[in-house]
Structure formats: structure tokens, C-alpha cells
Image (cartoon, coloured by chain):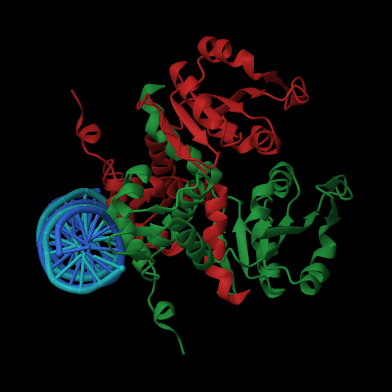
Chain colours: A green, B red, C blue, D cyan
DNA sequence: TAGATTGTTAATCGATTAACAATC
DNA sequence: TAGATTGTTAATCGATTAACAATC
């Protein structure tokens, strides 16, 4: 049986805004600001106060009439909504430049994403140590994923290799894929969640907007 | 005076889909597929045929009744729309792991984005060669940007440093900023276009969707 | 209490989908 | 020509904004 919150389907537009609220609330918290109204926050974030209230009320009534929102409380609630109070075991598949850069990105760990292993096909980089972890041969990956309770795989490998490896990982029990390969993965196992980061596409939307001034 | 196409404001939802069309058309082209109907493409891309036709018709009538779209022609037209027939001079500001990874990402060059320089404040990495370019001290950046016709700056530096450097770059004549720092840049010069890549936020939306299975 | 501000309903706006006449 | 498929208008759907009663 589902609870009230769970049965309501939250639109992805709302979900994508939550991390930004979380970021702004974190900054308020750092500046020792105790409470904030939707109006005040709307000015800082350049969105409407109405949208903020609507968005938050998808998940519950976190505010108080006449007062606004307690910053720390709301921050923690959004953290829970986003699932940041949990720890996620991550592997990075494809330990080239980008894979290593992500492995070194310490901020992820603060939010509970812990890099447990790096894998690559290239024997030349197998054995290299990145942030205290040796890059492993990709042939070790199946056993590793199956034994170590890995939740998320970060795919930073060429697009040709991505589909097969993604399907393998799904079969081995991974829950989510953070995909940096420039392709849309079509998994047999539909229960695996895919989040794409298509850097080239992001850069192309930038060129669209500046092209007439270059 | 503006032409018909220029006065029509294209929604950002449409713009964001263009690079994906472009990618699929590129793949069709590689597979020597000459023509495609909106229906066929809609199946491959998992969108509606109606949306494809609506999106494309924002920019012109690229198809032919009874035939569909010529793949190569449409590919080239979208390339022009996105501004990919131009060349963009890029600098990378913050030459840490992520900055170096992006400098090495050869695919960008194929689309006309040429990395001309890398800059960092850290004297320990100044002088290191990345893809044939020496990392320069950030003090050289002003002169460099002013003289070398730099169009885009990639910001891969800590969020504390990003706002000031972004404003400086804007003053020195940059057209676009590809921002990887986890902050919303508020530039004085509103003519500079900012495209954000907030990796942490992307990862958080993934955790939202898998949290109950972890 | 009076003022402030939420939570929520209603109104508006914009984006997506459906339908079909035009036409290759 | 007949069939296919576009370009485009109209209908629908969903997301955003406005308004305000509830209430702290």
C-alpha cells in the first residue's frame, strides 16, 4: 500500500528544481539565516513565490503561516526527499580523463555518493591509483558489482561500448546509471534508472544562443 | 529589420531537443539512410511524430509531403540552426581534473569548439601540457582573451572564484560561459549567455528516483 | 489582536498531441 | 494517379501564476 505522497506522481519539472532549492537553502544555512519566506526566496532564486510554494507542497506542508519556512528544517526535508540521507555505492566505468575527474570530485561524497571502484578496458591505465583506488580491469567488474552492493554506475566510456555494458550492469543488479556516453541507452531491464549528462548537447544549446554574435 | 525566423521566439524546450535530433540524424547518415519520415524517426527517438514536425517547422519546412525528410539535408540544416558551422574559440578556466578532461574531449572540436588555452591559479600545474597546450597562469588571461578573439569560457573552478572571474571575462568580451561551478552566475553584462552544467544536481535527481530501492 | 504568509483552489499560459487539408 | 506524409490549425493537456481564505 502506498502512502499519500507516494501515490501522487511528481512531475520531472518539479524534481529538477529540488536540487536548486537545496543549494540555496544550504547557502542560507551557511549564512546563519534561520527563516525565509517564499517571497524572499523567490527574489533570490529569480522564480515566483507561487512556484516555490506549489513545488514544496507536493511533498508536504513545510512552512507556517505568518512565519515562512525554517531554513534548517526545510533543508533537511528536501535532503530526505532527494534521498541524500542515504549512502550510494558507486563505480566509475571508463577511467579516462572524465572518469578520473568525477572520481576526484569530493563534493559528491558529501552528499552520500561514495566511489568504490574504477574500471577500464585499457591495460595501460589498469593499476593506476586514483584517489586511493586502483583502476581495475573491467573483467573484474561482474564479480565486484555482484559482491559489493553497488548502487550506481557512472558510464564515462565511448558510446560504442556503453549499451552492452549498461545491460550487463543492469543484469548484475545496479539500480541507477549516470550516463555520460553520448547515446540513449535502451535497457532490457526497465527498472534501472538512467540519468543522462549529454555534455555535447549542452554545449550546442550554448552555441545556438551565441552564434549570431560570433 | 528581423527576418520571419528571427522574430519568432523559439521556446527553450524546442532548442534543447535540437541536439538530440542532430545526433539521431548523424547516426542515420552514418548508416547510409537517405530519407526518413517523422513517424519513423519518432519510433526511434521515442517521441511523437507531431512533436518532431512542430519542432522543425519552427525553423522552416525541411520535408516534403509523401516523402519525408532527406537525412543529409536535415542534418545540415540543424547544424546551421545550432550554429555548428561556425568555429568557436574556447578557453578553459580552472585546469584541474575536470578542466583537463574537457580539454581532452576531442568530440567538441568536431563540432567547431576549439580549445585555445587553459588557465589556472595554481602555480604547481602552470606549465603542464594538456593536449599540446601549456596551462597558463590566470594572470595572463585578460591579455589573452582580449587579443585572441575568445568566444566561450568554460568555468571549471570552485564556486567561490566563479562570480568574479565570470564578470571579468564578460568585461573582456567573452560571448558565452559554459559554467560547471555549482552556482548561478549573476553577471552585470546581461548580453553574455550562460549555460550551466550542474553535475551535482543531475546526480541528485538520480538519487531521488532510486532512493526507495537502495 | 493585526500583520504576515502559508497552503490550496482557480485562472492563465504554454507546450504537446491530434487531426486533416495540401501536395509531393 | 493513388498513397504517403508533410505543414499547420485546432484540441488537449499540463505546468505556471494569481488569488485568497485559513491560520500562525
Q: Is A167 positioned to the left or the right of B160 in the image? A: right
Q: Is B19 positioned to the left or the right of A174 in the image? A: left
Front one among B45 and B180: B180
Residue A112 visible at all = yes
Residue B160 drawn above or below residue B210 = above
* Residue at the farthest right position: A127
Residue pictured at 60% horizontal, 27% vertical = B93
Q: Is D22 positioned to the left or the right of B172 in the image? A: left
* Residue at the farthest bottom position: A1
Front one among B30 and B126: B126
| Quarter of the image where the C terminus of chain A is located | top left
Residue A101 drawn above or below residue C17 = above
Residue B86: percent from left, percent from top: 46, 26
Image quadrant assignment for residue A168:
bottom right
Residue B33 visible at all = no
Image quadrant assignment for residue B189:
top left
Front one among B69 and C17: C17
Residue A86: percent from left, percent from top: 63, 68
Residue A146 drawn above or below residue B191 = below
Q: Is A10 positioned to the left or the right of A76 in the image? A: left
Residue A186: percent from left, percent from top: 56, 66
Residue pictured at 47% horizontal, 15% vertical = B172
Residue pictured at 50% horizontal, 40% vertical = B183
Number of on-image labels: 0
Amino acid at each position: 500500500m502506498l502512502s499519500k505522497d507516494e501515490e501522487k506522481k511528481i512531475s520531472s519539472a518539479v524534481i529538477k528544481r529540488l536540487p536548486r532549492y537545496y543549494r540555496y537553502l544550504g547557502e542560507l544555512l551557511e549564512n546563519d539565516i534561520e527563516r525565509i519566506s517564499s517571497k524572499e526566496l523567490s527574489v533570490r532564486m529569480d522564480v515566483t513565490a507561487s512556484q516555490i510554494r506549489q513545488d514544496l507542497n507536493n511533498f508536504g506542508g513545510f512552512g507556517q503561516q505568518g512565519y515562512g519556512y525554517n531554513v534548517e528544517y526545510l533543508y533537511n526535508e528536501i535532503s530526505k526527499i532527494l534521498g541524500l540521507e542515504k549512502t550510494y555505492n558507486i563505480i566509475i566505468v571508463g577511467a579516462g580523463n572524465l572518469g578520473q575527474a568525477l572520481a576526484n570530485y569530493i563534493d559528491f561524497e558529501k552528499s552520500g555518493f561514495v566511489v568504490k571502484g574504477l574500471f577500464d578496458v585499457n591495460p595501460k591505465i589498469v593499476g593506476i591509483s586514483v584517489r586511493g583506488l586502483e583502476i581495475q580491469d573491467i573483467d573484474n567488474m561482474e564479480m565486484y558489482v555482484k559482491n559489493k552492493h553497488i548502487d550506481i554506475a557512472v558510464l564515462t566510456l565511448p558510446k560504442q561500448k556503453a549499451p552492452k555494458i549498461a545491460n550487463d550492469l543492469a543484469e548484475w543488479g545496479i539500480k541507477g546509471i549516470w550516463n555520460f556516453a553520448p547515446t540513449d541507452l535502451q535497457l532490457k531491464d526497465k527498472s534501472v534508472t538512467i540519468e543522462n549528462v549529454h555534455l555535447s548537447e549542452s554545449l550546442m544549446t550554448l552555441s545556438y544562443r551565441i552564434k549570431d554574435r560570433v
